[in-house]
Image (cartoon, rainbow, N blue to C red):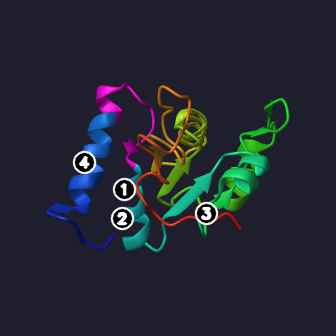
Amino acid sequence: MALDHVGNQSISAILSTAQSRAVQNNLSYAGALTPQEAYELLRINADAKLVDVRSRAELELVGRVPNATGIEWAFYPGMVANSDFAAQLTAQVDKNAFVIFMCRTGGRSHNAAVIAQQLGFTQAFNMIEGFEGEANADKQRTQINGWKHAGLPWTNA
């Protein structure tokens, strides 16, 4: 991976921070990234993949990140588990790739990163905060954190 800088922080420093989060939180996968860190790593590393595990309904109603690979963790309505998730992941994403998983708030993407690690993906990362982030006191998302709140590229098309 090419060395570049995010503000005063190098890509290697971002990865080190992500890996430290994994150790601190006893995560089995490579690390946990903020949306801003994930964006910078995707921008710098052309081989990195963003895998969006939200449902098609969420993508259509809430928005999507351009060039993300969509593999549903669960199907709407009812959030029925996608029993083919592992097979779809291994068919669509190289196990040696740098893979960042994203969902609405970071929960499903955490589960996806755990499965990826179990499947032999050595560079599986979870994007904490997710696309929409935490809900505020009024149960509104995108007001506290997340990809959208950070002003990172997304579309509702």
- In this rendering, position of residue 111 left or right of residue 144: right
The three-letter amino acid code for the residue at tag 1 is Gln
Q: Position of residue 127 (x, y in %)?
A: 46, 45
- Cα–Cα span, label 1 and label 2: 6 Å
Label 4 environment density (alpha carbons within 10 Å; few <14, some 14–19, many ≥20): some
- Cα–Cα span, label 3 and label 1: 15 Å
Q: Position of residue 145 (x, y in %)?
A: 42, 43
- Cα–Cα span, label 2 and label 3: 14 Å
The three-letter amino acid code for the residue at tag 2 is Glu
- Cα–Cα span, label 3 and label 4: 24 Å
Which picture quadrant has residue 103? top right
N-terminal label among 3 and 4: 4
The residue pinned by badge 4 equals 16
N-terminal label among 2 and 4: 4
Between tags 3 and 1, which lies in front? 1
Q: Outermost residue, front direction?
A: 138
Label of residue 36 in the image:
1
Q: Which residues are magenta?
A: 22-34
Between tags 4 and 1, which lies in front? 1
Element class at badge 3: loop
At 73% from the left edge and 52% from the top edge, which residue is drawn?
61
The residue pinned by badge 3 equals 68
How many numbered circles does the render carry?
4
